[in-house]
Amino acid sequence: MNYDWIKTRSDYDEEKAAVIDPQKGTEWSYQEMNIRAENLANHLKDQGIKRGDVVGIFAPNDVAIFDLLLASFKMGVVFLPINWRLKPMEIQSIIEDSGVKMIFYSLRHKESLTGTPEELLHMDIDSAEYDEICSPENHRPFETVDVERDDLASLMYTSGTTGLPKGVMFTYESYVSNVINAALTYKTNANQTSIISTPMFHVLGLNDTALPLLMAGGTLVLHRYFDGAEINDLMAKFKPDYLIMIPTMFYGMLAAENFNPKNFENIEYLIQGGSAPLPAVQKKFESMGLTLINGYGLTEAPLAMVNTPHNSKVKPMTIGKPIMYVDMKLFNDDGSETEDGEIGELGVKGKNVTAGYWNKPEMTAKSFRDGYFLTGDLAKKDGEGDIFIVNRKKELIITGGENVLPSEVEAALSEHPIVKTAIVVGYDNPEYGESVSAAIVLAEETENYEEILDAHIRERVAGYKIPRLYLEMKDIPLNSTAKPDRMEIQRMMNEKAKEKEMN
């Protein structure tokens, strides 16, 4: 089957802006996007890349991400966007596990690829050489290959409950189904414009925001790196019809000095996802007559549920109901389905859900129950079918839309000899939703232990995983099962954070 949708889009659409990059001063029509992809597909073929090979990109929001994705669909190549915010050690584990054959990169982030075999680092996407290859003026037609619907189309890596990088597999059917389901649910159309600020190495940015609009024939404005003041300027210039971002990004817009409610005159809806809602942000938009809608998804199941504008005014904290062609269940530990109001693990089912984890068949088998992917999130359903996330089953911390596994940070802290015990929890942060904190029992009295541990851990984990708050304790509080009482520690952290804010 032919999944080359950009070719069809270019054949049927009038010439109009598909992708605009204000920073580079470039604008590409659908016809030009198709040609860029064909040119890049020919280049990859010239380099010996063949169907089934994995090709990666390590870059901020740039047209090159679409170039490689669309070229991959033409060739039957596996598309791999890599999170440039990770530490080199984490990045290397992804490169090794994926078997990637070639990586396009942004020179600004090349240092993070330290340790990568030189032969894999193919080309700087901001170079004149790359522009020359993709330029529509140098069109080299490419004949699209046929693929099977269950062939591997893309890999996206996520740090799961084990703390080890896992490659989430998307088949052509799951990848395209996600985009179609989202576009149908949101009523995305060719007359709409939006700005993409969320990093496109995440499903929220690429699968849930950018691709539904492009598949529908709309206009996408690229925001290379999120900045609250910059996006306010883009809002004033491009007047988007909707925005989909993580809560902290909306916070950044509101907090910037150039925030102007007039920039939202064309807005039909605002959707937040990726982390827990920020009540202060929701109230601000409500005062402007706008409603911030909660959406829900994860790497393994992009955009699975979303609230409605009307329901958001009545139930602002719910993630709503499943989108089109997606089903859900809440499971008890014994596998039975919960009753209304009972807490259970959220499972989702649909063609948009991952086929499983790359090279991890046992983990894949454990992640499904009766065809439903087990999200690891605890939730409950009310009598009207609305879903509310209660907690994260494995104490995962989500800070600014990024996942932090406490056990990973605890292990890094415990490597230092002054640490006897370390328990990591999230605490409330109005800007990031949650921030990382650590309760520490010292092996020996150390006056400047915070500075010592901060320097120690910065060499071991990504920046967003570093504790922003420490609490020294003589003993770790335990619960009734003699395990660390994380809820009590979290309560104490929130109290300390409030005291610190007041002083």
Image (spheres, grey):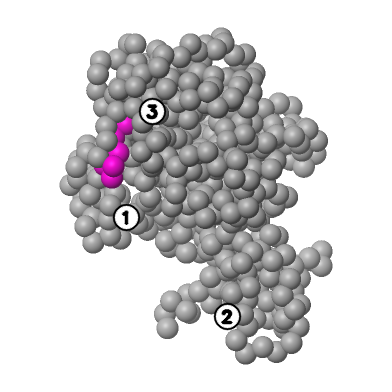
Q: Is residue 131 above or below residue 94?
A: above
Image quadrant in which you'd find residue 346: top right
**Secondary structure of the residue carrying numbered label 1:** helix
- Identify the residue position indicated by label 3 in the image: 134
Does the rendering let one see residue 360? yes
Residue at 32% x, 19% y is 31
Q: Quadrant of the N terminus?
A: top right
Q: Is residue 225 magenta?
A: no
Q: Tag 2 or tag 1, which sits nearer the N-term?
A: 1
Q: Tag 1 or tag 3, which sits nearer the N-term?
A: 3
Does the residue at mark 1 contact the one at mark 2 (Cβ under 8 Å)? Answer: no
Q: Is residue 498 above or below residue 148?
A: below
- The crowding category of the residue bearing disc 2, from other C-alpha atoms within 10 Å (few below 14, some 14 to 19, many at least 20), is few
The amino acid on which the numbered mark 3 sits, given as a three-letter code, is Cys
Q: Looking at the image, is mark 3 or mark 2 nearer the viewer? A: 3
Instruction: State how far apart marks 3 and 2 are (Cα).
Output: 48 Å
Give the residues in magenta. 19-24
Q: Is residue 272 above or below residue 487?
A: above
Q: Tag 2 or tag 3, which sits nearer the N-term?
A: 3
Lateral position of residue 16 relative to residue 489, left or right: left
The amino acid on which the numbered mark 1 sits, given as a three-letter code, is Gly
Instruction: State how far apart marks 3 and 1 are (Cα).
Output: 31 Å
The amino acid on which the numbered mark 2 sits, given as a three-letter code, is Glu
- Identify the residue position indicated by label 2 in the image: 451
Residue 377 location in percent, x, y? 63, 45
Q: Quadrant of the C terminus?
A: bottom left
In this view, the residue in front, 434 or 32, is 32
**Secondary structure of the residue carrying numbered label 2:** helix
- Identify the residue position indicated by label 1 in the image: 228
